[in-house]
Amino acid sequence: MKNILIIGATGQIGSELTMTLRGIYGNDHVVCGYIRGAERKGALMESGPAEICDVTDPQAIAEVVKKHNIDTIYNLAALLSVVAEGKPMLAWKIGIDGLWNVLEVARENGCAVFTPSSIGSFGPETPREKTPQDTVQRPRTIYGVSKVTTELLSDYYFNKYGVDTRSVRFPGLISYVTPPGGGTTDYAVDIYYSAVKGEKFICPIPKGVYMDMMYMPDALNACVQLMEADPTKLVHRNGFNIAAMSFDPEEIYAAIKVHKPNFEMEYQVDELKKSIATSWPDSLDDSCARAEWGWNPQYDLAKMTEHMLQQLSVKLL
Ligand code: SER
């Protein structure tokens, strides 16, 4: 039986992953690790164990791991790309010093570790379309620099100490549950909120700028599937390209207009977001994830849009 700790469990991915994993492995076997001030009312903190577990505090991680006999850690603590540009040292402290803490506790206690990487680990010199699994990674953002380091340090712990580290390069993640905070891809979530509220959407990303995106149910499946994968089949580890859809603002706008014909969008380009978005690939080649652990996403833009609009209407109206 797995005993899982999720660090950053109240965030965009963690809040849904915690509940998904509790559904699979049992409520008592999945610990919601949160930081002071991020407490939430409701099922996330009440349907199973919850512990204060700051990724920058190695002692706290070790204590929670020992107390709950943890064998798998999902390390989701991070600052997203736009916020990280304003606080580069904090981004490093959480992303990399935090990762060292997690990996050391994992080494001492025999835990497997999942730490997300991102499309942000690529940069302007990377092949832009169908970006290969193994290619140039020279990102220009501190977010990207910390994600490349995450991949390398995770591989290092696997090769040197045998710690079972695994990772995917997430694209922009879209969900109606917990909003993202401060990413370059956030516009693709915000646009649905505007559409459902009947407001005009002000788009910060220019027309024609493509980024890979994914609906949260597919992202959650990726986490579970990769951590359950047969290790003898894994040629790669940190981290796998995964892809589900790629679109520019015009295409997501058109997909929403199918359901909301009166929806309006106007561009007010944010220069920081533009410079980050144009330094990232347009679409990733995910054939290694498909071959090595059976990655197979279920949602394309049309199917995601229908579901997002339905669910957000229930939530907001
Ligand atoms: N969603 C992230 C961001 O925009 C990319 O992985 O920062």
Image (cartoon, grey):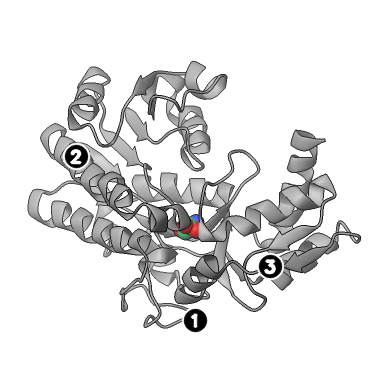
Q: As displayed, is residue 120 above or below residue 50?
A: below
Disc 2 C-beta below 8 A from ligand 1: no
Mark 2 lies on a secondary structure that is: helix
Question: What amino acid is at disc 3?
Answer: Gln
Left or right for 30, reference 41: left
| Marks 1 and 3, how far apart at CA | 26 Å
Other-residue count near label 1 (Cα within 10 Å), few / some / many at <14 / 14–19 / ≥20:
few
Mark 3 lies on a secondary structure that is: loop
Q: As displayed, is residue 197 above or below residue 58?
A: below
**In the rendered structure, which disc, 1 or 3, sits on the residue that comes first in sequence?**
1
Other-residue count near label 2 (Cα within 10 Å), few / some / many at <14 / 14–19 / ≥20:
some
| Marks 3 and 2, how far apart at CA | 41 Å
Q: Position of residue 266 (x, y in %)?
A: 77, 67
Question: What amino acid is at disc 1?
Answer: Glu
| Marks 2 and 1, how far apart at CA | 35 Å
Residue placed under numbered mark 3 in the picture: 268
Residue placed under numbered mark 2 in the picture: 101
Quadrant of the image containing the C terminus: top right
Left or right for 244, reference 194: left
**In the rendered structure, which disc, 3 or 2, sits on the residue that comes first in sequence?**
2
Residue placed under numbered mark 1 in the picture: 129
Query: On the image, which quarter does residue 136 sit in?
Result: bottom left
Return the mark for residue 257.
none
Q: Which residue is located at x 45 percent, y 75 percent?
A: 279
Question: What amino acid is at disc 2?
Answer: Asn
Whether label 1 touches label 3, CB < 8 Å = no
Q: Can residue 2 be seen here?
A: no
Q: Can residue 134 be seen here?
A: yes
Q: Which residue is located at x 33 percent, y 31 percent?
A: 5
